[in-house]
Image (cartoon, grey):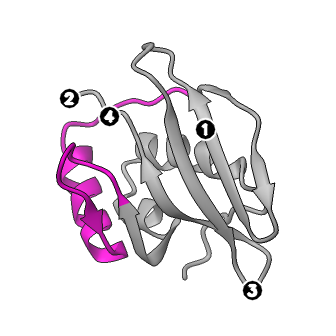
Amino acid sequence: MSTRQRATEPEDLARLVVKLVNAGDAEGLAELYEPDAVLAYPPGSPTVGREAIRALYERMLASKPHFELEEPLPTVRNGDLAVTSTKPSDNTGGRVQVVRRQSDGTWLRVIDRPEIRQ
């Protein structure tokens, strides 16, 4: 892992994603996921593993998207697991992530179901 800012609470991950997308940082985005995480994108064809997730973000960031922080919904925790979600500003449904506390106390995404507009 690099020296980038890490999520100390599950809710930090959404803010970090917005920050890193807007900075065009695919490597930093990939570091927010566990090594064998699953990103449910593109629809119907999940992306599995940090390297594949990094490559997907590189392709996505080529179009220079701009993300805004969305309203978080209540986090649900069970020990070292949590479910985070946001209410999309574009009313496309929900964005939901399963995250896990790491041995150093930080949080990473394990399963991510985004609604990315194309």
Q: Residues within 10 Å of mark 1 (few under 14, many from 20)?
A: many
Q: Which residue does the image show at 41% across and 46% down from the upper left?
A: 113
Say left or right for 29 vs 6.
left
**Quarter holding residue 70:** top right
Circle 4 is placed at which residue position? Answer: 116
Whole-angstrom CA distance, mark 1 to mark 2, is: 20 Å
Circle 3 is placed at which residue position? Answer: 103
Is 44 included in the stretch rendered in magenta? yes
Whole-angstrom CA distance, mark 2 to mark 4, is: 6 Å
Q: In the rendered structure, which segment of residues is drawn in magenta?
A: 39-68
Whole-angstrom CA distance, mark 3 to mark 4, is: 30 Å
Q: Position of residue 89 (x, y in %)?
A: 50, 15
Q: Residues within 10 Å of mark 4 (few under 14, many from 20)?
A: few
Circle 2 is placed at which residue position? Answer: 118
Amino acid at the residue labelled 4: Ile
Whole-angstrom CA distance, mark 2 to mark 3, is: 36 Å
- Is the residue 35 above or below the residue 44 in the image? below
Q: Residues within 10 Å of mark 2 (few under 14, many from 20)?
A: few
SS label for mark 4: loop
Amino acid at the residue labelled 1: Ser
Amino acid at the residue labelled 2: Gln
Circle 1 is placed at which residue position? Answer: 85
